[in-house]
Image (cartoon, helix red, strand yellow):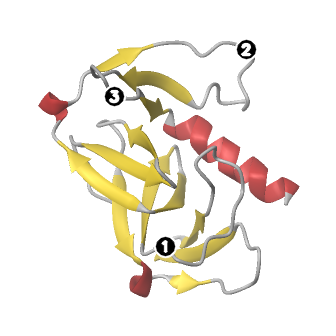
Amino acid sequence: MAETRQFLRIGLMGVDYLLPNSTSYAIEKREHLEINDAPGALIVAWQATPTGRAPAYSVDANLNPLSRPAWQRAVFFQAGSQTLGLVADELQLLAREDVRVEPFIPPGPAPTPAGHLFGGAWVRAAQAPVLVFEPRALADYLMHLEGSA
C-alpha cells in the first residue's frame, strides 16, 4: 500500500465521506479481487495480500450492512496492522490543499472501542458537510458488523 497525501472521497449511495490524507490506501478494481457471490454477504470480496486476504465490506450510505452487487471498485486502507476494504459507488482523489477539514467530536458515546467513526468534517458553503473517517474506528466498526452478521 502506498502512502498518499491526498484525501480520498468515497461515495456511498449518494453520500460522500473522506479518508484522511494521512491514511495509506489502495484502490482496486472489482476484476482484480476474489468475489464473494453469496447472497446477502457483508464481505463481498477479498484482496490477496502478503499476509493473507483482506476483506472488502459492503454498506449503505448510513454505514449499515447492505450487500450491493453492482459495485466496481473498492478501497483498502490500513488501520493499525489490519487491512480492510470498503466497496464504493465513487472514489475520487482530492488534493490536500483543496480540502480544509475542521476537527470535531461527535455527540454521544463512541460506537467502537477505537472511538468515534468521524474526527472531522469538510465544510463548504452551500454544500453538505463531508465527514472524515477515523480509520481505526471504521475498521473496528466494520469488523463488529461482520461479527454480528
Going from the N terminus, do you reach mark 2 or mark 1 first? 1
Going from the N terminus, do you reach mark 2 or mark 3 first? 2
Question: Relative to the observer, which residue lies in front, 73 or 134?
Answer: 73
Looking at numbered disc 3 in the image, what kind of residue is underneath it? Gln
Residue behind mark 2: 108
Q: Can you say whether 2 is above or below 127 in the image?
A: below
Q: Can you say whether 10 is above or below 72 in the image?
A: above
Which labelled disc corresponds to residue 39?
A: none
Residue 13 in percent (x, y) is at 52, 55
Q: Residue at x 66, y 12 (%)?
A: 107
Which labelled disc corresponds to residue 71?
A: 1
Q: Residue at x 64, y 25 (%)?
A: 115
Q: CA distance from mark 2 to mark 3?
A: 25 Å
The C terminus lies in quadrant: bottom right
Q: Residue at x 62, y 25 (%)?
A: 116
Which quadrant of the view contains residue 120?
Answer: top left
Q: Can you say whether 90 is above or below 129 in the image?
A: below
